[in-house]
Amino acid sequence: MLELFRYIFRRLDVRLGLSTVKGEQKSTLLPHNINAWYSLGSVLLVIFALQIVTGLLLMIYYVADADKAFDTVSFIMEGIPLGRLVRLVHAVGSSTMITVLLLHLLSVLFMGGYKSPRELH
């Protein structure tokens, strides 16, 4: 059983560098080739979180009924403070998320982010 844990740790250490994390945290500098393309994954995560928050806020007032849908959207847009902002951020966020996702996938493809040791990602 102990050999199994050692094997798993060695496999993870090759990919994540777990054994070198302890002493290098304070002295690690960013590589010189870091650019804006590396931040697209974080931007995508922020947009996804924003979609969840605005979706939950819209879910409070929206009624998914064919007869009441237009009235609830009108109420969200006009009757709720900042309702128009929340709805438009949610609507624009979905298109923005698809665009950033495609850019992120292209950046991973062209920069080789799928190669070893990150082939499992």
Image (cartoon, grey):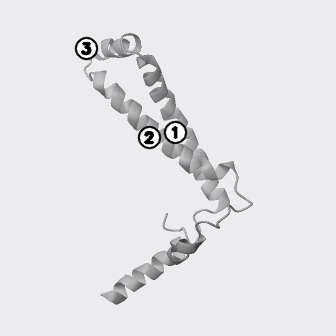
Measure the alpha-carbon separation of dots 1 and 3. Answer: 30 Å
Q: Residues within 10 Å of mark 3 (few under 14, many from 20)?
A: few
Mark 3 vs mark 2: which is more N-terminal?
A: 2
Q: Quadrant of the N terminus?
A: bottom left
User: Could you say which is closer to the camera, residue 105 or residue 10?
Assistant: 10
Q: Nearer the viewer, mark 3 or mark 2?
A: 2
**In the picture, residue 116 is in which quadrant?**
bottom right
Q: Secondary structure at mark 3?
A: loop
SS assignment at label 2:
helix
Q: What residue do we see at 50% from left, 39% from top?
A: 47
User: Are dots 2 and 1 in contact, CB under 8 Å?
Assistant: no
Q: Which residue is mark 3?
A: 67
Left or right position of 120 against 4: right
Q: Tell me residue 115's x, y (percent).
A: 59, 68
Above or below 41: residue 116:
below
Disc 1 secondary structure class: helix
The residue indicated by pointer 2 is 49
Q: Tell me the distance, in whole angstroms, between the alpha carbons under discs 3 and 2.
A: 31 Å
Sequence-earlier tag: 2 or 1? 2
The residue singled out by tag 1 in the image is 97
